Image (tube, grey):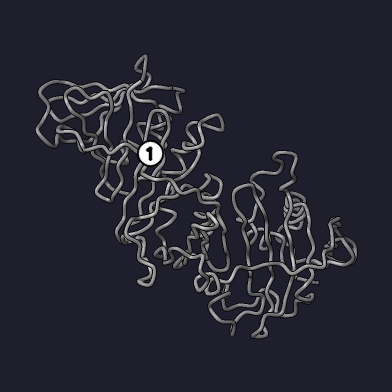
Amino acid sequence: MKLNITGSELENHLRPLRAIVRQSDEKNYDSIGLSITVEDDGRKCLRAAIAQPTYDAFIRLNLSGAGADADCNAGNEPIDADAVACSRDELWVFARSALSAVNRSVGQLRADYVATGSALDVSLGEDASLHLDGMYRRKALEYPDHDAIVESDEALLYGTFMAGTLPEALRTALAVSRLGGRSSNPMEQAVHLTLGADQLVVEALSMTAQHEYRSETALAIDERCRVDQPVHVCISRDGAQVLSDMAAISGGTVHWVYSRAQQMLMAWCQPYVLRLDAQEVPDCVCTPVEPGARGMRIDTRAMRRAIQRARNVGARVAEVVCHVSGMAELVTPGRSVVMTLPSRCVGEGLTGQRTFRLPVNVVHAMMSGILADEVVISFDDDSEYVVLETDLGVTNTISEV
């Protein structure tokens, strides 16, 4: 097996197939399988796969360039049309972290990656080479077939995520799920998806916040697999991050299949495939929240700058002060940051000044993913939390501290 490519280009293609978890429960997850195969239509493809505790990721990268069909087309220019393929039933396994280090060492230089025996030799010319030990296996490297899975009896739901929607839908949910760290409970470490009824719902929560994203344009369900009730599943935070990365790189429509029998959600983000463990839960995890009767409409960029300044001075808590006049301020303890926010009253109007003490890290996580020009912070007279929402289907709840 031989491939001629720059180290940086190879690493860019393989980046979503990174070992986020290297060791868990005495099992080594820091490995990647590689092979180059000749497909049925004559094209040459680099195949690679990794296994992680909660998901498996695959790539089938077209090396032949123009003429390959869109199912595995990474572009019109050939990456290496002269690559030397191995047989379909063999592959090499290497430490993923070690392969990344080799790719970084090669950098922008072109090199020959040659797998022989159980090792990978990387030649940079007559006077420079790198060597990586691995394992040779007489085994085909799997690449899941969408049509075969859809036609099987195990596919409960299948459809598409529209182009460009997944990174937006998952961005804030990922930030919120990270707030509690690894010590938080499993529900808080997961990202929750509701699939069905032509509406995508993404949820995440922590001890002091919950996030909900709704879109009627992000998801399409195939007419052949309608269900009476939407399906609510949770996937790991790591898996959701890789799904977002793959969808962003692909940039196109993402085909997906959910199997209740296998508790699995699969997504095809050409040239990638992601197979995620998906635990079905009976209901939404976020408490339904209605916007408050009173509130302020605030400029998003100003709010984002203010909370970033609060982070920069090390503040853990910031006060959002809502004045009767319609002016809002963000103030940190000791008044190290005092910033007036362009704003105006909405709803029933304020009967008196309201001040909310909010955790800076939570507000920052929620503001980082908002694309709308303005956000609405609303509350009731006796609220101990604020509802932060946009007109783009995003609703966040932040508890006072």
What's the amino acid at mark 1? Met
Quadrant (top left/top right/bottom left/bottom right) for the C terminus: top left
Residue 314: x %, y % from top left: 46, 23
In the rendered image, the vertical position of residue 30 relative to residue 330, given as above or below = below
Where is 309 relative to 253, above or below?
above
Q: What's the residue at 72%, 60% (across, down)?
A: 7
Q: Position of residue 365 (x, y in %)?
A: 42, 37
Q: Is 191 displayed left or right of 51 in the figure?
A: left
Q: Is residue 58 above or below residue 73?
A: above
Image x and y of residue 294, in percent: 15, 32
Crowding at mark 1 (Cα within 10 Å: few <14, some 14-19, many 20+): many
Q: Is residue 132 left or right of residue 65?
A: right
Q: In the figure, is residue 326 to the left or right of 4?
A: left
Residue under label 1, please give it.
Answer: 366
Quadrant of the rendering where the N terminus is positioned = bottom right
Foreground residue among 6 and 277: 277
Instruction: Report the front residue among 289 and 64.
Output: 289
What is the quadrant of residue 350 in the picture? Answer: top left
In this rendering, is residue 94 above or below 381?
Answer: below
Residue 36 in the image: x percent, y percent?
A: 73, 72
Q: Residue at x 35, y 55 (%)?
A: 230
